[in-house]
Image: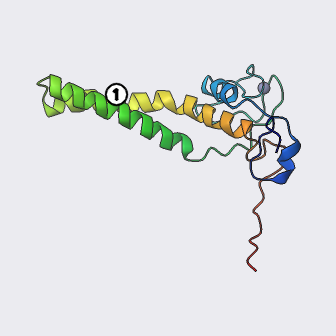
Amino acid sequence: MNVEQQVFGASQAQAAPARQLGQAMRRGFLGRCPCCGEGRLFGAFVKPVEACAACGEAMHHQRADDLPAYLVILIVGHINVGLFMGFEAATTLSTWQHLAIWVPATILFALVLLQPVKGAVIGLQWALRMHGFGGHGDEIEAIDDE
Ligand SMILES: [Zn+2]
């Protein structure tokens, strides 16, 4: 296999030129098209545009599914629980005061992170030519049990 090529699953993808994973994820994180970095990636909060307005790259077939939500829970959980435990140890706040701080902080942090994380996941799928980004559709492979 050529080092300059990225292959994800299907053998048709072997001839395709490599796409820069880090750049695509960074562009997606910033809400830009992972292909050109110019067009907007999202038409609504977490709904991607049908296709990039700048380069025409189709975005309708992305399948981020639950991965962005899972990653946001992972990130927000680790940061907010760590901050809560630090505050809890360093201050004498009551339980309701902690609730008043950490519940809104957790909701706000999750809402702020959801779109950038979904953009990065779409960038990852685009760079790895997953789910239609490689020019071929998703097909379920036949199980060959001899
Ligand atoms: Zn574009």
Q: Is residue 80 above or below residue 1?
A: above
Residue position for label 1:
105
Provide residue 108's location: percent of width, then percent of height: 40, 28
Q: Quadrant of ligand 1?
A: top right
Q: Is residue 108 visible?
A: yes
Residue at x-position 36% and y-position 30%: 79
Provide residue 21's location: percent of width, then percent of height: 69, 32
Q: Nearer the viewer, residue 84 or 104?
A: 84
Residue at x-position 77% and y-position 32%: 19
Q: What amino acid type is highlighted by mark number 1?
A: Ala
Q: Residue furthest right?
A: 15
**Split into 4 quadrants, where in the image is the C terminus?**
bottom right
Provide residue 112's location: percent of width, then percent of height: 48, 27
Q: Nearer the viewer, residue 14 or 52?
A: 14
Q: Is mark 1 within 8 Å of ligand 1?
A: no
Residue at x-position 84% and y-position 29%: 56
Residue at x-position 73% and y-position 21%: 37
Q: Nearer the viewer, residue 33 or 82?
A: 82
Answer with left or right where residue 23 lies relative to residue 16: left
Q: Is residue 141 above or below residue 14?
A: below
Q: Is residue 42 visible?
A: no
Provide residue 76's location: percent of width, then percent of height: 40, 34
**Split into 4 quadrants, where in the image is the N terminus?**
top right
Q: Residue furthest top?
A: 38
Colour option used: rainbow
